[in-house]
């Protein structure tokens, strides 16, 4: 081995290694101090690109979850308002039933009417006051707009949801292929009204609205019809004279859910023989929308397809073709992280001027002075109240269904996505303290060893001086 006093390559190698160790030690201490694995782009260039992409995706997911949770809160407010309205509707329906019959005095009927007026006013107040974040929910701003040129034939159009990603208006072709019909007895059979009653007769009539036991003591045909028709608000069944002068029972509404059943309990012998009728049901209209069969209950039609969900009533169900145009609107909810996941929900149709049906009457007409107030003879108060109650329940169910299956499932899916992103981000972004502490100890040991080695390398030139002394 030669002994020189020139440049010492060993010293430079050791100094180079110490420099690298010092740089590594700075990175390790920065990670331990900040808790971040990447503090400079040079720490992990590829990891930084992945981290930025994952963080951007996580930010979008976080925003979507927050938006859906706010949507859920708004829908809960709407649901609570409709729950109160539904409770009031049940009371109105009960009051209209209690007010029926000849045993109810004028004073009692006036008291029932006052309660109905108060309940109707309360419904409008609740609907007008329902708000979230300073915005009214049911004031019309969240309604999905639709119209038809045949407004006298197609009425009560209610659009419950639509696809907001479809630009412009949507035209729906409605084709009525068969009309709906009442449930009614065959006019060629039954009790002959020309014969009158030989004795007081008791019958039980059952229809869509309920059952009534009716006593007919008169011998005149007009009195027989009047006794039955006096209970039609309870039963949903009316009486008329058929083409052969026979007593005919008919449902007051059309559709397969309307029916008539008559049982003669006692009385006139002919009535006991010819006046019984087993259950007879009505028929629903047959309708297609854009060539697809729609569901119909009587003259009320429900359609789901082409990105929309709506219902409407066929005022004139004579077979023919009509057009409904969905023009847009509704409360829009962003369910995911991009615009394609948006949905529009129609929130409306729950004020007392819209609850009901055009061919039957609306809930507001039950108030004092209205066309179907309790003081008006032959009113449709019971049927209107029941129809309005069903509509409120249907709207509440649709809101609840959207809240649970659209918003709720979106939150669950987004939370799972959020969890996956956090798991992917964590090892890239955050410091593994166990690993970095071990690295720091290793670096310190190596640095101490390098310092010792540097001392040994320096001693070689000192040995040359010893030879000269």
Image (cartoon, rainbow, N blue to C red):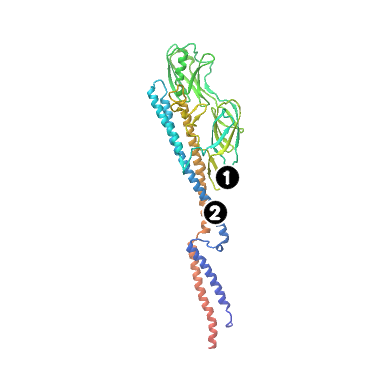
Camera-side residue of 400 and 460: 400
Q: Which mark is residue 70?
A: none
Q: Secondary structure at mark 1?
A: helix
Q: Residue at x 54, y 85 (%)?
A: 465
Q: Is residue 449 above or below residue 408?
A: below
Residue 26 at x, y percent in the picture = 51, 67
Label pair 2/1, CB-CB below 8 angstroms: no
Camera-side residue of 348 and 282: 348
Residue 328 at x, y percent in the picture = 57, 38
Residue 9 at x, y percent in the picture = 58, 77
Q: Secondary structure at mark 2?
A: helix
Q: Is residue 211 above or below residue 131?
A: above
Task: Name which quarter of the figure residue 312 lies in.
Answer: top right
* Precedes in sequence: disc 2 or disc 1: 2
Task: Name which quarter of the figure residue 110 lies in.
Answer: top left
Distance (Cα) linking label 2 and label 1: 18 Å
Q: Is residue 465 above or below residue 412?
A: below
- In the orientation shown, which residue stands out farthest toward the front? 369
Which residue, given by chain and number where applicable, does mark 2 sit on?
A: 56
Residue 278 at x, y percent in the picture = 49, 20
Q: Residue at x 54, y 40 (%)?
A: 344
Q: Which mark is residue 340?
A: 1
Task: Name which quarter of the figure residue 7 lies in.
Answer: bottom right
């Amino acid at each position: 081995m030669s002994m020189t006093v020139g440049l010492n390559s060993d010293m430079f190698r050791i100094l180079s290694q110490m420099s690298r160790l010092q740089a590594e030690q700075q990175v390790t201490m920065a990670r331990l101090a900040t808790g971040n694995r990447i503090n400079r782009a040079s720490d992990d260039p590829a990891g930084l690109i992945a981290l930025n992409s994952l963080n951007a995706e996580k930010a979008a997911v976080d925003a979507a979850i927050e938006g859906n949770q706010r949507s859920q809160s708004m829908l809960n407010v709407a649901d609570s308002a409709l729950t109160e309205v539904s409770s009031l509707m049940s009371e109105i329906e009960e009051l209209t039933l209690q007010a029926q019959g000849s045993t109810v005095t004028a004073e009692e009927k006036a008291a029932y009417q006052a309660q109905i007026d108060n309940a109707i006013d309360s419904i409008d107040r609740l609907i007008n006051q329902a708000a979230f974040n300073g915005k009214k929910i049911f004031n019309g701003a969240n309604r999905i707009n639709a119209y038809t040129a045949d407004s006298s034939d197609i009425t009560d159009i209610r659009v419950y949801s639509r696809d907001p990603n479809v630009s412009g208006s949507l035209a729906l072709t409605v084709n009525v292929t068969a009309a709906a019909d009442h449930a009614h007895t065959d006019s060629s059979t039954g009790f002959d009204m020309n014969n009158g009653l030989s004795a007081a007769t008791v019958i039980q009539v059952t229809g869509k609205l309920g059952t009534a036991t009716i006593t007919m003591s008169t011998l005149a045909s007009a009195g027989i019809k009047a006794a039955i028709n006096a209970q039609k608000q309870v039963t949903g069944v009316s009486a008329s004279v058929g083409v052969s002068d026979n007593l005919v029972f008919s449902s007051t509404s059309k559709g397969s859910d309307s029916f008539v059943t008559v049982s003669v309990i006692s009385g006139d012998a002919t009535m006991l023989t010819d006046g019984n009728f087993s259950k007879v049901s009505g028929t629903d209209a047959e309708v297609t929308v854009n060539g697809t069969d729609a569901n119909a209950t009587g003259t009320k039609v429900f359609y789901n397809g082409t990105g929309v969900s709506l219902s409407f009533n066929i005022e004139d169900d004579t077979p023919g073709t009509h057009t409904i145009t969905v023009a847009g609107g509704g409360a829009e909810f962003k369910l995911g992280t991009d615009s394609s996941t948006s949905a529009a929900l129609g929130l409306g149709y729950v004020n007392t001027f819209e609850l009901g049906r055009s061919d039957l009457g609306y809930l507001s007409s039950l108030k004092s002075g209205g066309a179907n107030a309790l003081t008006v003879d032959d009113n449709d108060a019971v049927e209107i109240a029941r129809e309005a109650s069903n509509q409120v329940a249907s709207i509440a169910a649709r809101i609840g269904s959207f809240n649970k299956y659209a918003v709720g499932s979106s939150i669950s899916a987004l939370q799972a996505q959020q969890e996956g992103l956090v798991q992917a981000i964590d090892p890239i972004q955050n410091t593994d303290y166990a690993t970095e502490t071990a690295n720091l100890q290793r670096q310190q040991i190596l640095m101490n060893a390098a310092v010792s080695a540097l001392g040994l390398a320096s001693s070689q030139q000192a040995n040359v001086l010893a030879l000269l002394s």
